[in-house]
Amino acid sequence: MTAVQYLSQEKIWFEKTQYDEAERRFYEGVNGPALQAQDTGANTILQDIARARENIQKSLAGSTAPGTGDHGELVTRMKDLELENQSLHKVVKDLRSALSKLEARVAVLEKVPASAATVAPCAKAAPVQQPKERAPVEEDDDDLDLFGSDEEEDAEAERIREQRVKEYTERKAKKPAIIAKSSILLDVKPWDDETDMAKLEECVRSVQADGLVWGTSKLVPVGYGIKKLQIQCVVEDDKVGTDMLEEEITKFEDYVQSVDVAAFNKI
């Protein structure tokens, strides 16, 4: 079978382009009114936008124009502020007037003498006029002594004061004085394990002083067969100190290497 024969028997749509064109024109004719509706909707939206803009412009123009609602409210507030300002000025004026009257009254009161009715309570208690009131009224003027009574009273007060000071001094002298004491624990270290600890303790106790009392003692191991002497003593703080004890004990150089204060307590 030749190619021409094969093609003559094959069903081929040679007019497809014509049908497509016809279909396109048909749908264009059908969709024409729909497109116009879309254009109409767009025009409606544009008109709404234009009307909204116009309303906004009118609102802005109305808010700035004189005689509108906002402007009227602003004018009302300004009037209220002016009235309030006038009221405040009046109050300040009244206060200034009252202050002036008060200052004038205080100035008058300051000029009143101290013997007026308004005397402070402390002034009432002070017997300022007592010496003159004590003078007898029936005696003659020649026998009246205005100054002698004051001198006698001053002498009597001085004598009483000296007597009280003397009595206080005597009472204070009779009281026993409090003696401050301390309890001291000393560590006395020897040179080596061959040091005679009994002799070392004897040397330590040979240190005597006013206000020093030796107490108990014991030997405490240190190491390598060496023992230290731990001895207790009671001292009066005003008479004996730790520096003096260390200095006196370390004088025994043949037995004592060093002295340390292990404990110090106030009694």
Image (cartoon, rainbow, N blue to C red):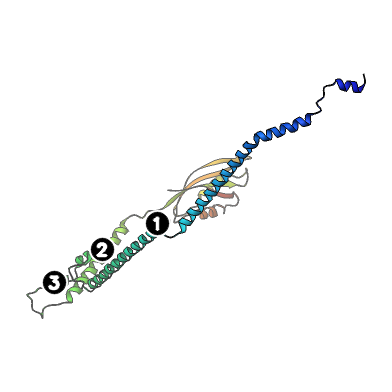
Question: Residue 228's quadrant in the figure?
Answer: top right
Q: Is residue 147 above or below residue 14?
A: below
Inter-mark Cα distance, 3 to 1: 82 Å
Q: Please, what is the three-letter code of the amino acid marked with disc 2?
A: Arg
Inter-mark Cα distance, 2 to 1: 89 Å
| Element carrying mark 3 | helix
Q: Residue furthest right?
A: 2
Numbered label attached to residue 164: 2
The picture places residue 183, in percent across and down from the top left corner, at 46, 48
The residue that appears at 41% across and 53% down in the rendered structure is: 180
For residue 28, side relative to residue 100 (left or right): right
Determine contact: label 2, label 1, CB under 8 Å.
Answer: no
The picture places residue 138, in percent across and down from the top left corner, at 6, 75
Numbered label attached to residue 215: none
The picture places residue 13, in percent across and down from the top left corner, at 80, 26
**Residue identified by numbered label 1:** 73
**Residue identified by numbered label 3:** 133
**Residue 203 appears in the figure:** no
Q: Residues within 10 Å of mark 1 (few under 14, many from 20)?
A: few
For residue 160, side relative to residue 46 (left or right): left
Q: Nearer the viewer, residue 87 or 226?
A: 87
